[in-house]
Image (spheres, rainbow, N blue to C red):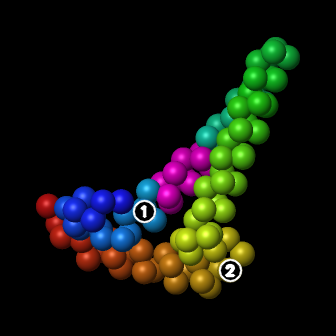
Amino acid sequence: MNEMIQNMTGMGGMTEQVIATDLLVSAKSGIKNYALALTETATPEIREALKAQLNTAIDVHEQITNYMMSKGYYHPADMIEQNAVDMKTTESALSLPQQ
């Protein structure tokens, strides 16, 4: 992200992590919604379309997860390390200037 934008938002280097985390949460929500819709569908054609969308959403989730893990933003297999990242993010968010 552009340094000027980072300074304007007051988030510095945290902006990329915040965006990636939001994207991951949205991907998870989409997966849940597709799975729920799939269980409520009545026709084979719609079921197949939803299955295709669900599989795409799962693939996107994997890509986001891999990206976040490569950047050190996400540690799904290490709760202690993930907690440390979350605490650092929380402290950064709490120190942002109030507008």
Residue lying farthest to the right in this orientation: 44
Q: Is residue 53 above or below residue 49?
A: below
Residue at which label 1 appears: 16
Q: Is residue 56 left or right of residue 30?
A: right
Residue at 81%, 15% (x, y): give it. 45
Q: Is residue 11 above or below residue 79?
A: above
What amino acid type should be assigned to the residue bearing mark 1? Glu
Give the overall secondary structure of the magenta segment.
Answer: helix
Secondary structure state at the residue bearing disc 1 = helix
Please give the label number shown on residue 78: 2
Mark closer to the chain start, 2 or 1: 1
Location of the N terminus by quadrant is bottom left
Q: Is residue 11 above or below residue 88?
A: above
Location of the C terminus by quadrant is bottom left
**Residue neighbourhood size for the residue with mark 2, other residues' Cα within 10 Å, grouped as few (<14), some (14–19), many (≥20):** few
Q: Is residue 24 left or right of residue 97?
A: right
Q: Visible in this render: residue 36?
A: no
From which residue to which does the magenta span run? 20-29
Q: Is residue 13 above or below residue 79?
A: above
For the residue pair 11 and 31, the one nearer the viewer reads as 11
**Residue neighbourhood size for the residue with mark 1, other residues' Cα within 10 Å, grouped as few (<14), some (14–19), many (≥20):** some
- Is 68 included in the stretch rendered in magenta? no
Residue at 61%, 55% (x, y): give it. 64
Q: Position of residue 53 (x, y in %)?
A: 71, 32
Q: Nearer the viewer, mark 2 or mark 1?
A: 1
In the rendered structure, are the residues bearing label 2 and label 1 in contact, judged by CB atoms less than 8 Å apart? no
Q: Visible in this render: residue 49?
A: yes
Secondary structure state at the residue bearing disc 2 = loop
Q: Position of residue 56 (x, y in %)?
A: 71, 38
What amino acid type should be assigned to the residue bearing mark 2? Asp
For the residue pair 94 and 22, the one nearer the viewer reads as 22
